[in-house]
Amino acid sequence: MNALARTAQIAVIGAGAMGAGIAQVAAQAGHSVLLFDVREGAALAAMDRIGQNLDKLVAKGRLAEEAAKQIQGAMRVIDTLDGLADADLVIEAIVEDIQAKRDLFVEVEKRVRPEALLATNTSSVSVTAIAAPLKHPERFAGLHFFNPAPLMALVEVIAGLATSPQTRQCLFETARAWGKEPVQARSTPGFIVNRVARPFYAEALRLLEEGVADVATLDALVREGGGFRMGPFELMDLIGHDVNAAVTRSVFESYFQDPRFKPSLLQQELVAAGRLGRKSGRGFYDYTDGAIRPVAQEAPDGPQPVSVCVEGDMGPAEVLVEALQRAGVNVERLPGAGLMRLAGATLALTEGRSATARSAEDDVQDLVLFDLALDYAKPGRIALAKADQASNSAIGAAAQLFRQVGWSVSVVDDSPALVVMRTVAMLANEAADAVLQGVACPEDIDRAMCFGTNYPRGPLAWAQGLGAHRVLQVLANLQSHYGDDRYRPSAWLRRRAISQQSLLS
Ligand code: NAI
């Protein structure tokens, strides 16, 4: 099924933030666009805002003045739903309320031609449920744009139970023809992005609740070590805690209170206090004028490392060993279990046990664990945690090794899987379960997370690069540490781990 022709007429209902953005996207793609809103003057105000956006593009030289005029000329406000008679696609972006959406589509269906397609931009209501009262639910689907729609590339094309493959395919191709990056998903709570992203916030909130590190340090580690564009706390502050907590709660309730999505008491307190983030002037950070922004905690100094004995394969951190050699550190290699021994400390990449447990179980002295990094060849900030049994000077010695090759270092409390490894393993686990449950294919899930949330790497590709067995081990260790079903590894990941291992052997 092809994309809708450029001559197709698009109608957008609800001219708020999303509706106006979607109307702009459709008009910029060359369609004639109708805009409707129940609130008097709302659609005209949206047209004004779109005009201002286009003027800005002209001023920046990204759009010709003539083209801007043409786009504006292609948009028209309609005062009643009767104006939909010739629409080929109706996209709804009204209030997030199932009854309002159902009522609207029942009225829309009475007015449009039988071949017209109908789509909802809902981010949390079941597409299947909205379509239930329709006479022809097969022509109905979700078309989930992200905010701001003209800038965000991702569109989730959501099939409800009754959506026909033709409807789904036509909307997918149409979104692509509009310059978007569409992905296909089944109507399930949170679809792809709002589900798979939950651990990014939830694990950070848990780390903070457990006192593993402060907000600024955790954000810096995720940003500078994990390669994410924003840390979880600054991102939650930007989204707004009311909105972020509401999405978490909705996904939690919709999945019948699966502990994986359990909301955070800490975030609930922020909402209760009215500390909603940037928009209220205060969230985890203080945004009032003159407020001092906290910075990441720095690890203590230690003696300059002269030589290191690397026992076994360091896995993804192997490039660190090469960097140490280039920095003039003598490197001796021996067989072993992935340890870097230097004077005063023994380092290992976290595999999900706490340093204290691993030191005792594997009988390693002065053990300091380090975190996962997006790319160990590109120094950023790394977390270190020492075993309770290790001497205090072990941290300084370990930190100096990383500093030697350009890393900034923060010490965190001894917590299983540290910060970035825990976040990435849980994101990959959620993505894996979404594949298992047929929500979307692995490629679309990874693309959705890269285009919808700007993750530096798709969670499944990341897990594949680390080795599914490694991620599985991290999750199994987290689960055994906490005794919490939240960390149960996905059966899909287990299967990947086995098949990857047998391919290697
Ligand atoms: P908004 O509050 O900015 O705009 C909603 C508009 O719909 C208002 O202008 C309102 O007057 C109008 N409206 C309400 N009931 C109507 C009806 N029965 N008929 C016609 N117009 C009606 O809301 P926003 O943020 O644009 O969200 C719209 C939809 O998009 C919601 O379903 C929301 O969940 C979804 N969405 C929102 C995103 C966001 O970041 N704001 C992102 C992705 C989806």
Image (tube, rainbow, N blue to C red):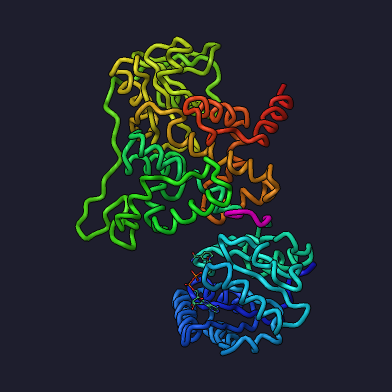
Q: Is residue 424 left or right of residue 136?
A: left
Quadrant of the frame with the C terminus: top right
State the quadrant of the N terminus: bottom right
Answer with the quarter of the image where residue 383 lies: top left
- The quadrant holding residue 30 is bottom right
291 or 321: which is nearer to us?
291
Residue at the outermost left position? 290
Residue 152 lies in quadrant? bottom right
- Which residue is at a point 55% across and 20% down the rendered structure image? 313
Residue 433 in sight: yes
Q: How many labels does the image show?
A: 0
Q: In this view, does 449 lie to the left or right of 497?
A: left
Nearer to me, 329 or 467: 467
Q: Position of residue 326 (x, y in %)?
A: 44, 26
Residue at image location 70% in from the left, 27% down from the top: 498
Pinpoint residue 347: horizontal percent, then vertical percent: 42, 20
Q: Magenta segment, which residues?
A: 185-191
